[in-house]
Image (cartoon, grey):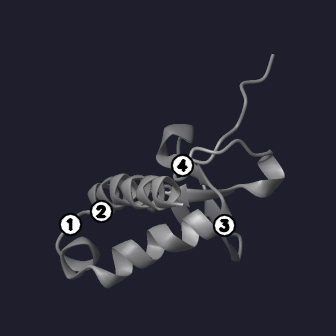
Amino acid sequence: MRRPLGCAGCGRSATAEQLELHHLDYAGVRFARGTWRAFERHDDLVPLHPYCHDLLHRLIDRDRVLAHHRARRVASVIALDRLRIKLHNQEAAS
């Protein structure tokens, strides 16, 4: 039996086709045979709705500390926590 899928940002359920994978870091990504390929472990990937994925990247890119002074994995984890709080607060306010 397959485990139900969900977005790690908003927590809503989704199908595999509705989700994108966020790389916690790019250690497993490399150029091979003329194209970029991902070879990381499953626990290095986080499923997100495209909207949540975009928000996560914006949080990382717009925060000077996350974007420039944190390791990619650490920045992703911190930004994901912030994203969850932000989305939860938005949902609670509506």
Q: In the rendered image, which residue does mark 2 sit on? A: 75
Q: In the rendered image, which residue does mark 4 sit on? A: 45
| Residue 75 vs residue 81, the one in the foreground | 81
Mark 2–mark 1 Cα distance, whole angstroms, equals: 6 Å
Residue 54, by quadrant, is bottom right
Q: Amino acid at mark 2?
A: Ala
Q: In the rendered image, which residue does mark 3 sit on? A: 50
Label 4 CA crowd tier, 10 Å (few <14, some 14–19, many 20+)? some
Mark 3–mark 4 Cα distance, whole angstroms, equals: 14 Å
Residue occupying image coordinates x 36% and y 81%: 61
SS under mark 1 = loop
Residue 4, by quadrant, is top right
Image position, residue 24 (x, y; %):
43, 55
Residue 74 in the figure: left or right of residue 85: left
Q: Quadrant of the C terminus?
A: bottom right
Which label is found at residue 70? 1
SS under mark 4 = strand
Mark 4 or 1 closer to N-term? 4
Mark 3 or 2 closer to N-term? 3
| Labels 2 & 1 near each other (Cβ < 8 A) | yes
